[in-house]
Amino acid sequence: MSTTDTPLRYPGGKSALAGFLARIARATGLRNAFYAEPYCGGAGAALSLLFSEVVSDVYLNDIDRAIYCFWKAALVHTDAMCKHLHTVELSIPEWQRQKAVLLRCHRHSVLDVGFACLFLNRVNRSGVLRANPIGGLAQEGEWRMDARFNRAALVAKIQRIARYRNRIHISNLDAAVFLEGTVAKLARPTLTYLDPPYFAKGQFLYRNHYEPEDHRKLAEYLKSGALPYWLVSYDATPEVQELYTGCRRLTYQLSYSAAKRYSGREVMFFSPALQLPVEADPFFGSQRAWNGRLFTPSPAKRLLQMAVSDPTS
């Protein structure tokens, strides 16, 4: 089982960004600040920043009711979630039962939906909730549905999260409503990291994807200056590059595994108020400077290539 702080496996998950986000917070002088994610998903980076005391509170939001219910259940129904983890059968009939709960999530309790989300996330291929289980319905091959279901490790992660329940705030809002109604009104400086559904392939990876107009409205809101400290990551499509014209950007290439392995080029954009650290490598802490040149870092599992551009230089 991975060493991430989150119990959820998530397509394009950004747990590895925690160190980079911490360096940005320090460089910008954000001490004892809040941290917000409007598309929290697995929230791996958020938990790492909280557990390491880089931020004082995290504000997590996801419009997907299944994801929201998981976080709510982990915080409020901790003992019941852990009991289910210890006792649930890892079988196709149980998989079908949990899938039925998720398909009708508005008819079931927060606890039932939250556990169904965790169960399917751990037993399905690449953690995709609408995918088939690892090993298929016939449960054949080298890997079966128990391959990513370490009961003891999952219980430990849930219990650790619950110990921070007074510092983790979860909501189930549209991202725009969350940004304008919650984040913009917080009493402390807040570092906001946005990881919206991908522009090109979001409909294949997420239960709630965006239309081009949604991406445009988000870019306009961020560029308006309503939030001083933000960064956003995207698939590096021409459309996205155009939406964030004039913003500092960092492009890089990642390897993914969602149903099948592929590589994708991504890009980050940064608000003017953020002070960027000298380390140009967001995933592995490279000491290279932000010099605007294309380079190939030393061999690494995840980050393959990166380029930095600053429209002000």
Image (spheres, rainbow, N blue to C red):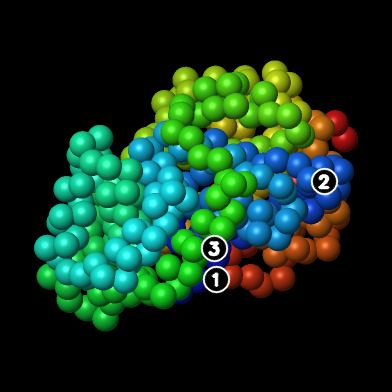
Q: Are marks 2 and 1 in contact (CB under 8 Å)?
A: no
The amino acid on which the numbered mark 2 sits, given as a three-letter code, is Arg
Q: Secondary structure at mark 1?
A: loop
Q: Secondary structure at mark 3?
A: helix
| Residue that label 2 marks | 31
> 277 or 115: which is nearer to us?
115
In three-dimensional space, the C-alpha distance between marks 3 and 2, rounded to whole angstroms, equals: 23 Å
| Residue found 83% across the figure and 50% down from its top | 26
| Residue that label 3 marks | 160
In three-dimensional space, the C-alpha distance between marks 2 and 1, rounded to whole angstroms, equals: 26 Å
| Residue that label 1 marks | 3
Q: Position of residue 65 (x, y in %)?
A: 36, 38
Q: Nearer the viewer, mark 3 or mark 1?
A: 3
Quarter of the image holding residue 260?
A: bottom left
Quarter of the image holding residue 34?
A: top right
| Residue found 77% across the figure and 34% down from its top | 189
Q: Are marks 3 and 2 in contact (CB under 8 Å)?
A: no
Quarter of the image holding residue 49?
A: bottom right
Mark closer to the chain start, 3 or 1:
1
Q: Are marks 3 and 1 in contact (CB under 8 Å)?
A: no
The amino acid on which the numbered mark 3 sits, given as a three-letter code, is Arg
> 258 or 8: which is nearer to us?
8
